[in-house]
Amino acid sequence: MPNTDSILRIALQKSGRLSEDSFRLFKECGIKFESGTGKLKTSSSNFPAEFLFLRDDDIAGYVEDGVADIGIVGENVFIESNRKAEITYRLGFSKCRLSIAVPRGVDYKGIDDFQGKSIATSYPRLLGNYLKEQGVKAEIHEISGSVEIAPSIGLAEGVCDIVSSGSTLLSNGLKEVETIFRSEAVLISNKKLPKAKHDTLNKLLFRIKAVQTAQNYKYILLNAPNEKLQDIINMIPGMKSPTIVPLAMEGWSSIHSVLEENQFWENIEAIRSAGAEGILVIPIEKMIY
Ligand code: PRT
Ligand code: ZN
């Protein structure tokens, strides 16, 4: 059993847009726990961690108060909450933007159009800061849901809401005119974590980084005639010292290397015309430098 002082209490969204990716992240980090059992709290069987499953709106407050040590939450919700906790790591999933939208038929010229008008939103703090920065005096109507219907029922001239694909705005006859904040899932931590818990957090971050680095890289294998080996190696940026293995077939070798996937695809046609065959691109689970 781990020393109880080092057990990290982790707050995750119980069910919603953050849950699946949050649960997957821990799984990929090799941290086992039961989810989806309806329990509100569970312990990991192989890592000093306890998990609390909550509404996303409650996570920042729990972390500020120290009921949870860390949590995963949308940056939009965290900033809006104004809770005091640290953003320790940006996770890159659940990306979205907070945007202002107006009815499609409106001839929008700029944010100054909102002087003396009103905007409905569930994000009064983020919107208020933005309007202040822009020097616009507009009324903010705070509503907790179905923001996008506000203009059609005469509640406000515009809305400020989360947008991902844009289809919700479209189907409500609205068009996006200003993006005021870009958000992604963030790992937040209590500001006064005791040393033992901090050490556990560092172990967790080490694993998260290893998983995320690995996702951008692939293990590449390809076969090539020996006289073309150097040409092919030169075509692949980042391939500094690949492993070259002779094949049973006379005059051919296999090249093995770890590459950033994008660099590889950019040159795939040239690599093939140079004579490469049997190309395999294999995912890497974890990568530790
Ligand atoms: O039940 P609980 O309170 O825990 O969850 P919730 O319903 O409050 O939040 P949830 O699960 O919907 O979202 C959690 C977090 O996911 C948000 O705080 C954002 O950081 C992030 N996220 C990413 C989104 C979206 N994409 C998103 N598309 N949150 C909400 N939406 C909604 C948006 O409000 C709008 O109604 O989806 C609609 C727009 O989507 P598009 O694709 O039509 O543009
Ligand atoms: Zn919520």
Image (cartoon, helix red, strand yellow):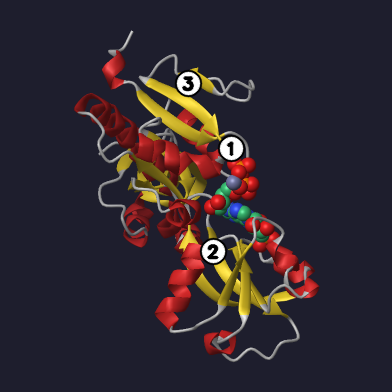
- The residue positioned 58% from the left and 84% from the top of the image is 114
Name the kind of residue labelled 2 in the image.
Arg
Quadrant the C terminus occupies: top left
Viewport quadrant of the N terminus: top left
Question: Which one is nearer the viewer's eye here, 69 or 65?
Answer: 65
Q: Quadrant of residue 213?
A: top left
Q: State which quadrant residue 147 falls in.
A: bottom right
Nearer to us of marks 2 and 1 is: 2
Is residue 117 visible in the rendered image? The answer is yes
Residue to which mark 2 is pinned: 97
Q: Measuring 59% from the left and 20% from the top, which residue is drawn there?
A: 39
Q: CA distance from mark 2 to mark 1?
A: 20 Å
**Where residue 220 appears, x then y in whole percent?**
43, 44
Q: Is residue 63 above or below residue 79?
A: above
Pair 2/3: label in front = 2
Q: CA distance from mark 3 to mark 1?
A: 14 Å
152 vs 113, left or right, is right
* Residue type at tag 3: Lys
Nearer-the-camera pick, 161 or 142: 142
Q: At numbered mark 2, what does the secondary structure look like: helix, strand or loop?
A: strand
Q: The disc labelled 1 sits on which kind of residue? A: Glu
From the image, tell me which residue sits under label 1: 20
Residue on which disc 3 sits: 32
Q: Which of the two discs, 3 and 1, labels the residue nearer the N terminus?
A: 1
Q: How many marks?
A: 3
**Mark on residue 117?**
none
Mark 3 crowdedness (10 Å alpha carbons): few <14, some 14-19, many ≥20: some
Identify the residue shown where x is 37% and y is 40%: 64
Please state the horizontal and vertical placement of residue 95, each as a whole percent of the image. Answer: 52, 56
Q: Secondary structure at mark 3?
A: loop
Single out the residue that lies furthest toward the left.
Answer: 195
